[in-house]
Image: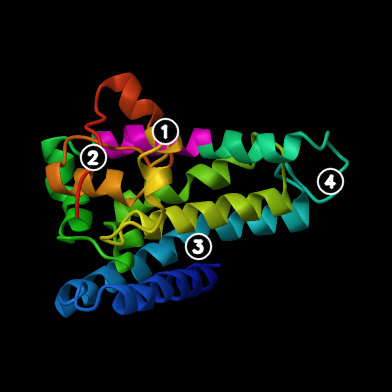
Amino acid sequence: MSAIVAVRYLLTSGGFAFWTAKRHPGLYANRRQIAREIGWSLASALIYGLPAGIVAWGWRQHGWTRIYTDPHAYPLWWLPASILLYLLAHDAWFYWTHRAMHEPRLFSRIHAVHHASRPPTAWAAMSFHWSEALTGAIVIPALVFLIPIHVAALGIVLAIMTLMGVTNHMGWELFPRALVHGRAGEWLITATHHQRHHRDYRCNYGLYFRLWDRLCGTDKGLGGF
């Protein structure tokens, strides 16, 4: 599973980095930074793979989880509802753990690894200290023991997690201006929103949604490139 996570990271981040080189030549000029991001990310992939492997083994061999394969085991409306519920739960976990890591002692010991990417690149999506990687690695595996989800819906959750992790760090905005500056952009996080976090640090802590930032007064709006 660690190898699968590592290959997924290399393909996804590598693909978006290649696209960036075509769209914005020279944007990723700091090769030492990129090498550091890849090194930390591959170490994080090892950590992410451990609980994922336990879940896969427990599901297949012992039926421990609430992952199901029959789409009719639950009402069909539960398929999209479970995806949204997983994303909301993950987003809440990420907001509070991420915000905690910006406290001075935790930041200097742990989260500074991620913020060493100035500006972040598509390779920085998993560039974490091992202890931060651990907090991110356990949340989805924990949810599958609590909330029923179809295996395909779980795949969608993981795909969204990967996509948002990469695109939020690209250093340029992938999504159209109408989305970013429209009604949807008031609640969804894209690179323009997360870029301000990397610039100003003590704001914009969310992963998918701006909900917790708005509720807690930490949403400082969109940044620029």
Q: Is residue 101 above or below residue 120?
A: above
Q: Nearer the viewer, residue 224 or 74?
A: 224
Which mark, by number, is residue 49?
3
77 sits to left or right of 174: right
Give the mark nearer the N terminus: 3 vs 1: 3
Residue at the image position 43 percent from the left and 53 percent from the top: 164
**The magenta stretch spans which residues?**
88-99
Q: Secondary structure at mark 3?
A: helix
Amino acid type of the residue that numbered disc 4 sits on in the rendered structure: Pro
**Is residue 60 shown above or below 200?**
below
- Which of discs 4 and 1 lies nearer the camera? The answer is 1
| Foreground label between 3 and 1 | 1
Amino acid bearing label 2: Met
The x and y percentages for residue 154 are 65, 50
Mark 4 element type? loop
Looking at the image, tell me whether mark 4 or mark 3 is earlier in sequence order. 3
In three-dimensional space, the C-alpha distance between marks 3 and 2, rounded to whole angstroms, equals 22 Å
Q: Earlier in the sequence, mark 4 or mark 1?
A: 4
- Identified by mark 3, the residue type is Gly
Q: Work out which quarter of the rendered image holds the N terminus and state it.
A: bottom right
Of residues 195 and 101, the one nearer the viewer is 195
Q: Which residue is mark 2?
A: 101
Q: CA distance from mark 4 to mark 2?
A: 39 Å
What secondary structure prevails in the magenta region?
helix
Q: Which residue is mark 4?
A: 71
Residue at the image point whose x is 40% and y is 55% from the top: 165
- Residue at the disc numbered 1: 187
Which amino acid is tagged 1?
Answer: Trp
Distance Cα–Cα, label 4 vs label 3: 26 Å
The answer to whether marks 2 and 1 mark residues whose Cβ atoms lie closer than 8 Å is no
Asked if marks 4 and 3 touch (Cβ < 8 Å), the reply is no
Instruction: Tell me the SS state at disc 1.
Output: loop
